[in-house]
Amino acid sequence: MDIATIFGLVAGFSLITWAILMGGKFILFVDVPSVIIVFGGTICVLFVKHTLQEVFGSVGVFMKAILVEPKNPEDYVTQLTNLANLARKDGILAMEKVKVDDGFLQLAINLCVDGATPDFLEETLNKELDCLAERHSNWIAVYEGIGDTAPAFGMIGTLIGLVQMLADMNDPSKIGPSMAVALITTFYGAFLANMVALPIAAKLKSYSQKEQLIRKMVIDAIVGIQKGINPNMLKLSLKAAVPPIQRNFD
């Protein structure tokens, strides 16, 4: 579970709620037409820009951004070095008994044990990596799209409210509700974009970059094992992918 994401979302919602309550009544910031304009309009644009699978799947991706346990490159350095030591001591076929939770690493081990050449091994695993990057890019685009679209619909709601207000200037009782729609839609759009959508897109991008880095480490390690590289040399090579502050491990 990513505590930072949960803390940021909860704290952000709490601060906005606190600011609203300190300045007036919460009900003043609840407006159904504004909700329909911003949230409904944004959802409609998502269906235009993306497939049904991507739109509905984005909900699960949001939960993963909150609940996923980030992978650590340093853990993989140790694990991959152990595999290299095992292959050097008992032969590559000894890795056949190794079972891991990471599906990509397990695929790499299976290909290595099955006798794939280093070139075929590297080509196949790089295809898997490219497909992963493409899938992640699509999910990130969904949330970046929300971040771009929500403020635009906030502005549309503002224009609608202003038009309604100007059209009813002779009726003072209608000026207030029209102005509320004009201002609250802008608030909703800015809040949805900057408190939810864009931060989640940035977090997904960070996760994607780290996972791609780890998969590149796996590719380099398994290809190196297939070529018979010395485990100590392999470990030094893999450590280059780990931030210096995190390299204090055996």
Image: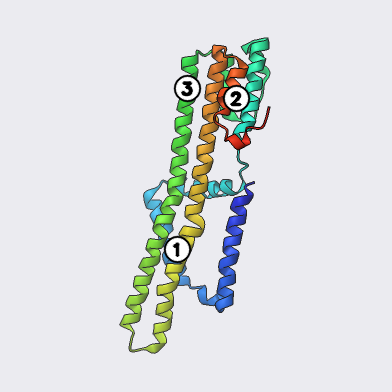
Tag 3 and tag 2, C-beta contact below 8 Å:
no
Residue type highlighted by circle 1: Ala
Crowd tier of the residue under label 3, counting other residues whose Cα lies within 10 Å: few below 14, some 14–19, many 20 or above = some
In the rendering, which numbered label is found on residue 45?
none
Nearer mark to the viewer, of 3 and 1: 1
Sequence-wise, the earlier of marks 3 and 2 is: 2
| Distance between the alpha carbons at the discs numbered 3 and 1 | 43 Å
- Residue at figure coordinates x 45%, y 32% from the top left: 131
Residue name at image x 46 percent, y 51 percent: 143
Identify the residue under disc 3. Answer: 124
Viewer-nearest residue: 74 or 130? 74
| Secondary structure category for the residue under label 2 | helix
Count neighbours of disc 2 (C-alpha within 10 A) and say few if under 14, some if 14 to 19, many if 20 or more: some
Give how far across and how far down residue 21 sits, in percent: 58, 75
- Disc 2 marks which amino acid? Gln
Please tell me which of labels 3 and 1 falls first in the chain. Answer: 3
Q: Is residue 84 above or below residue 148?
A: above
Q: Which residue is mark 2?
A: 106
Tag 3, which secondary structure?
helix
Q: According to the image, what is the colour scheme of the structure?
A: rainbow
Q: What residue did someone put label 1 on?
A: 190
